[in-house]
Image (cartoon, rainbow, N blue to C red):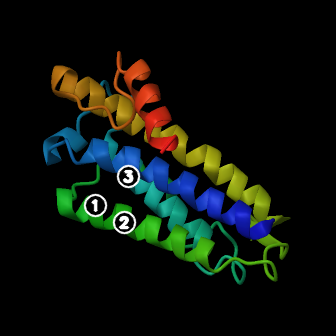
Amino acid sequence: MVEEYLKNIKTQFESYKEVADKTIAQLTEEDLYWRYNEESNDIACIIMHLSENMLSRWTDFFESDGEKEWRNRESEFANQNLSYSELIEKWNKGWDCLFNALNSLNETNFNKPILIRNKEVKLIETITRQIAHYPYHIGQIAFIGKMILNDKWNSPSIPKGKSDEYIRLEFEKNSK
């Protein structure tokens, strides 16, 4: 059961990352810093927030608190001034940390508790929290990307008006 759950969770995280990756790939460096208004986050900030969250939560997660002392959450939402490639490097570093952590899990260590903000929690609680947290921000990335690109937007999921075609193709593919 644990192995099946972990496989499913990895697939879900991969699908969320794919939506963000497909959105980010359509954007320029300038686009990553576009803000709707002063109170809004740009995509660069969201990339930094997710990456730093992943690194904090999943680095040495059995040995140290998931809220690392080196993390400065407030700075994640400040102007980043990083190049496109530097942002992508940070983005992938966070995801690599998450996937390496998930790949280290198995039946023997799955029920071992971990610490988040000095509170002992079950690993499954932490995974569940992150499986809700990350897509929240990935939805923001996709929405901001769609606002920027407007009619040049290529949907990373089922495009508007293409649901019937998508379902028909899935049925055809799965009946073979």
Foreground residue, 129 or 162?
Answer: 162
Which disc is residue 92 wearing?
Answer: 2
Q: Secondary structure at mark 1?
A: helix
Residue visible at 16% across and 48% down? Answer: 29
Give residue 86's quadrant in the image: bottom left
The secondary element bearing badge 3 is classed as helix
Where is 111 relative to 17, above or below?
below
In terms of image quadrants, where is residue 65?
bottom right
Label pair 3/2, CB-CB below 8 angstroms: no
The x, y position of residue 42, in whole percent, is 32, 39
Instruction: Measure how far apart labels 1 and 2 are at the Cα level.
Output: 6 Å
Q: Is residue 83 visible?
A: no
- Position of residue 55 relative to residue 15, above or below, is below
> Relative to the observer, which residue lies in front, 153 or 83?
153
Amino acid type, callout 2: Asn
**Within-10-Å neighbours for mark 3: few <14, some 14–19, many 20+:** many
Q: Which residue is mark 3?
A: 47
Report the Cα–Cα distance between label 3 and label 2: 10 Å
Look at the numbered discs 1 and 2 and tell me whether their residues touch, using CB distance below 8 Å: yes
**Can residue 59 be seen from the camera position used here?**
yes
The kind of residue tagged 3 is Ile
What residue sits right under mark 1 in the picture? 88
2 in relation to 164, above or below: below
Where does the image place residue 164, in percent across and percent down from the top left? 43, 19
- Disc 1/disc 3 C-alpha distance (Å): 8 Å
